Amino acid sequence: MSSLRPQREEPPVLEEWYRRHLGPGLHDISSSGVHPYTFAEIRDLCGIRTEDLDAVVMDDSVSQGGAGIRQAIADRYAAGDADRVLVTHGSSEAIALTLATLLRPGDRVVVQEGIYHSLGHYPREAGCEVAVLPAAAVRDGEIDPGVLDALVTSGTAAVVVNFPHNPSGVSLSHPGLKALVSRAAEAGAVLVWDAATAEIAHRWEVLPDPGTLYPHTVSYGTYSKTFGLPGLRVGWAVAPPELLRATFPLRDRTTLFLSPLVELIAERAMRAADRLIGLRAAEAGRNLDLLTAWMAEHEELVRWTPPEGGVCALPVIRELERPGTAPTAVEDLCRELLARHRTLLVPGTAFGVPHGVRLGFGGREDEFRAGLTELSAFLRARGGRG
Ligand SMILES: Cc1ncc(COP(=O)(O)O)c(C=O)c1O
């Protein structure tokens, strides 16, 4: 075998699905983010003047992120401690840098079932001993204490979770978070916490960054979801400064630092976070009301657990639950929906749930309504056929 042949995992199903199917003119009701702002809207909402942009010197920035953007993130998520913040190209880069640096072969790592692909990839890639936290163990805002104790044993290196969970929308309550933090602390485990959509909560209050409760936490945030800025490609990690410094050898050989222009926009957006997130959270709330009514009207065709946070849910299509249904039938169903109704969902196979689909309700209200109307016509025409 040629030594040049790459030995890698296949691309994640989720990203491959979007590569193949996302395009203009669709009713996209698949996203885990809110509908994106235009740059004009951002300039207006964040008070960015043309002179501010013109004054940016297009020089190098620094490895951990420029002082202004780091402080803005720290003030919102890290009790003002900018030394605990690393600014990255999306939280994807924060995940890659910190997990590749933190994890060692043979480490015992607990990973939530159906977790966002890169959070599951790095423990496998590092040769860790992975134990799965079952999705069913998270109920009413708490992780079943028996399951938690059995999984997060003494010597566990890390516990990797994402709440509100993409795509199910399952989340933790404040007491549920405290119980998880206590268990991680007792076991001496690092808590790896992906908070991509933390700022939009439905059932309980928005959770604090667990790093403010337990210093051995690595948490991730992003502008791509609740801020409505996926095209900015900025995210961050909040973590112990030693770990952040230890990521530099990898960063020095990959992306080095961000553009100062991007950092300026991100800093202003962070300072205007309440406004940016508030507008989109209100819209997502109205869409969720619509979706809740829609689910009730289509009860014979779909079932769901209402999301507790974030802007997506994982409804189950009943016809796919019939015995003998192929595990990839959901992909055929989603492709047919796209071909006939130009409406995009993500098949649950992207998250290991072959009966479900990711349905995002963070989109523009009129587009979301139109997408649901198309989905309704599609499912009703199939009449629950298998
Ligand atoms: C839970 C979660 N974490 C991290 C990411 C990575 O996002 P980004 O790199 O755009 O910040 C995503 C993107 O879908 C996500 O859903």
Image: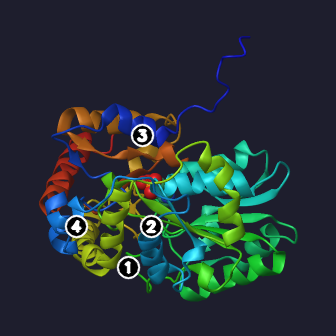
Residue 286: image location, x then y, percent:
21, 74
Q: Earlier in the sequence, mark 4 or mark 2?
A: 4
Spatial distance from mark 4 to mark 2, Cα to Cα? 38 Å
Q: Nearer the viewer's eye, disc 4 or disc 2?
A: 4
Residue 208 seen anywhere in this rendered image of the structure: yes
The mark that comes first in sequence, 2 or 3, is 2
**Residue at position x 71%, y 45% from top?**
124
What secondary structure is found at the residue carrying circle 3?
helix
Badge 1 vs badge 2, beta-carbon distance below 8 Å: yes
Question: Tag 1's secondary structure?
Answer: loop
Q: Earlier in the sequence, mark 3 or mark 4?
A: 4
Residues at discs 4 and 2 in contact (Cβ within 8 Å): no
Report which residue position mark 4 lands on: 52
Task: Provide residue 236's location: percent of width, then percent of height.
Answer: 50, 64
**Mark 2 vs mark 3, CA separation in Å:** 20 Å
The earlier-in-sequence mark between 1 and 2 is 2
Q: Residues within 10 Å of mark 4 (few under 14, many from 20)?
A: few
Badges 3 and 1: C-beta atoms under 8 Å apart? Answer: no
Measured along the vertical axis of the image, is residue 81 above or below residue 284? below
Residue found 19% across the figure and 42% down from its top:
26
Q: Amino acid at mark 2?
A: Gly
The residue singled out by tag 2 in the image is: 169
* Residue that label 1 marks: 202
Dot placed on the residue nearer the N-terminal end, 4 or 1: 4
Three-letter code, disc 1 = His
Towards the viewer: 2 or 131: 2
Q: Which residue is mark 3?
A: 330
Display colour scheme: rainbow
